[in-house]
Amino acid sequence: MTPAAEFDVAIVVPDTMNAARVEEVIRKSAGSLLEELLLFDEYRGEGIPEGHRSLAWRLTLRDPERTLREQEIAARRERVIRTLERELGVKARIA
């Protein structure tokens, strides 16, 4: 079995936005290499605007035939973030 690649994506969303909708967009934009998607954090507080929350997902990618290269992983992460911004109007949270 080839090794998995993991990365986290945290975004700031309005309190009214359903996490399931965000997850749907992540799954679609991550594509066929997505093996697992886990919502692991929800944060409200300092640094987050009133009426919003930060949601963080861990994405696990795996190609069944080869090891993914760092550039491929970074490009996939960027694609997920850009798709979320475009389709949902949300912003990535930079820690």
Image: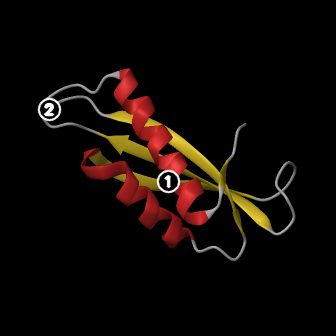
**Label 1 element class:** helix
Comparing 92 with 6, the one in front is 92
Name the residue carrying label 2.
1
Image position of 85 with respect to 20: above or below:
above
Residue located at (31% from left, 48% from top):
34
Quarter of the image that includes the N terminus: top left
Q: Extreme front residue here?
A: 86
Q: Nearer the viewer, mark 2 or mark 1?
A: 1
Q: Amino acid at mark 1?
A: Thr
Query: Residue 46: where, in percent of width, then height?
Result: 87, 50
Q: Position of residue 18 (x, y in %)?
A: 58, 74
Whichever of labels 2 and 1 marks the residue nearer the N terminus, that label is 2
* Nearer to the camera, 83 or 39: 83
Which residue is painted at 73% across and 61% down in the image? 53
Q: Position of residue 61 (x, y in %)?
A: 32, 40
Quadrant location, the C terminus: top right
| Pointer 1 local density, CA inside 10 Å: few below 14, some 14–19, many at least 20 | some
Q: Left or right: where does residue 8 sit relative to residue 55? A: left
Position of residue 38 measured from the top left corner of the image (x, y, whole percent) = 45, 54
Q: What number of labels is visible?
A: 2
- Give the labeled residue for mark 1: 83
Q: Nearer the viewer, residue 27 or 45?
A: 27
Amino acid residing under circle 2 = Met
Image-based side of 43 in relation to 61, left or right: right
The image's colour scheme reads secondary structure
- The kind of secondary structure element at disc 2 is loop
